[in-house]
Image: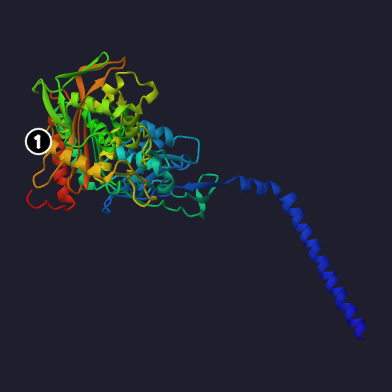
Amino acid sequence: MNMRRTNKRLALFMGLALLFLVALMGRTFYVQVIAAPGLQDKADGQSVRTVELDAPRGTIYDRNGQVLAISRSMATVYANPKQVEDPAAVARQLAPMLGLPEAELFTKLSADSGFRYLARKIDQSVGDKVKALGITGISVTSEPKRVYPKGALAPQVLGMVGGDEDKGLAGLELQYEDVLAGEPGESQVVSDLSGNRLATQSLKEAIAGEPITLTIDAEIQYETERVVTAVAEEFQASKACAVVIDPRTGEILAMANTPVFDTNNYAASSVEESDRRNMAVTDQYEPGSTFKMVVTAAALEAGLVTPETTFSLGPTIAVYDRVVHEAHEDVPAVRKYTVTEILSKSSNVGTVTLGLQVGKTRLADMIRKFGFTAKLDIDFPGEVDGQMLAPERWSGTTIANVPIGQGVAVTPLQLATAYAAIANGGVMVQPHLVQGQGAPWSSRVISEKVAAQLRQMLTVTVEDGTGKLAQVKGYKVAGKTGTAQKVKEGGGYYEDRVVASFVGMVPADDPRLVILITVDDPATQHLGAYVAAPAFARIADFSLKRLGIAPAAGN
């Protein structure tokens, strides 16, 4: 009895299973054979595309948290031309709102496609107005755009981004692309044959880039740019630049170039390519008299002289067939100068005399130690190194040229960093523009004793020498003027074209700032003492007050 019941249940189960299998096979046959053409038509009527979502770039801050560059959400207007019923009317309506030619919009709206950008990364308020029109086939979405809230501040330093993805193309935007650039996201958009969006699915969220904090002080940067712009205009110079650096840390508080222009318009056709260069890092020039401290340092370091060692000097000095004259005409024909006076009065004859005592080997070694022949590896693209003829290739007269800053080429940043080593007790610290990106290197260039001697000698230069106009009320200043003839392309020097400069440190007894001013080809006045030294004083006065560095008692 029980066996018969079991067999009936098994037969029923087998029958149901067979029925299910037949139904499944029938459905499969229907889908794959009978209904296949219709389903394929339906699938062909849909499109699935993956859209990349731009990631906001990391924000750039100054040292005090002021925003210098940020990615803001902007409106992007796009169209599905297949849904636009009257392209001419829509183009006429949108053209004044988007600021685009009506003919250009009509061409896009008449395209035989399901997607066309009309305007990208425009003001959000404009996008809202377009959206409010409710035009069929016209849509508005959001995209990040790089914006520089300070406008005309440090354009050559910050650089630019470009392309639809806002990739770094110049300046710090390029240097720190890997940090600032985020990771783009992805979304999947399903549309019907008419281009109507059926569904949107997020595949990957966009990840914003990391922020960076600069060593730049926005207020000091602004004042420095204001001063160099005024100097270039006053003396009708082709260009000017300035660097403000903390000698103890290598942090650059300001790096200014002329002309200054709105960073938001960095790529505008009205901005010359040469104007986009950060000349403090990318341009070389012969430093002239500001270089005289190098041979002085070499002589002191070798123990050949002291600051009080005296030399009897004539009006000229001959080295083989090269006769070196004094730059200033109002000097006695025969005089006795101490080493301090040679530097403070910027005596060419005295400096060459020191160079002959130092010799090419020790002088070349000191030039290398001060970092003039190699890149400083500042965190900025396009840095060039200095130039010095290899000592084995020096002619007999090279020792008469190099000590007075001829026959060598440096960048403004190299010169500022060399003086920063003197300010920092003889230790050079790697200059840098961004905080927290690794410890800067440092190296001893000269002894602490020689650094102190040079600071004192350079103080005399400002108090009683060629740098008097660099004085800052309440503070001791140490520094050096320079007036270097510009080199002709075919060799030789221009008689009436120069680079005027001043580089100094303040307060001289405990330097907190080193400031360099370089003015290229001033037309109405040539001497660095009159062109660059007063500009140093203005920048130094503002920076000292900005940083709260109190005047020394009795100054």
Residue 101 visible in the shown view = no
Say which element carries label 1: helix
Q: Quadrant of residue 447?
A: top left
Q: Is residue 509 left or right of residue 263?
A: left
The spot of residue 146 in percent (x, y) is: 35, 45
Instruction: Return the residue at label 1.
Output: 464
Amino acid at dot 1: Asp
Label count reads 1
Of residue 412 and residue 137, the one placed in the foreground of this image is 412
Residue 358 sits above or below residue 139 on the image: above
Q: Is residue 254 left or right of residue 118?
A: left
* Quadrant of the rendering where the N terminus is positioned: bottom right
The spot of residue 317 in percent (x, y) is: 20, 19
The spot of residue 437 in percent (x, y) is: 39, 50
Residue 484 visible in the shown view = yes
* Residue furthest to the left: 554
* Residue furthest to the bottom: 1
Q: How is the image coloured?
A: rainbow
Of residue 368 and residue 434, the one placed in the foreground of this image is 368
The spot of residue 99 in percent (x, y) is: 31, 37
Which residue is pictured at 45% across the width and 34% down the height? 110
Q: Is residue 208 left or right of residue 243?
A: right
Q: Quadrant of residue 453?
A: top left
Which residue is pictured at 79% across the width and 58% down the height? 25
Structural crowding at the residue carrying mark 1, measured as other residues with C-alpha within 10 Å and reported as few (<14), some (14–19) or many (≥20)? few
Q: Is residue 120 left or right of residue 537?
A: right
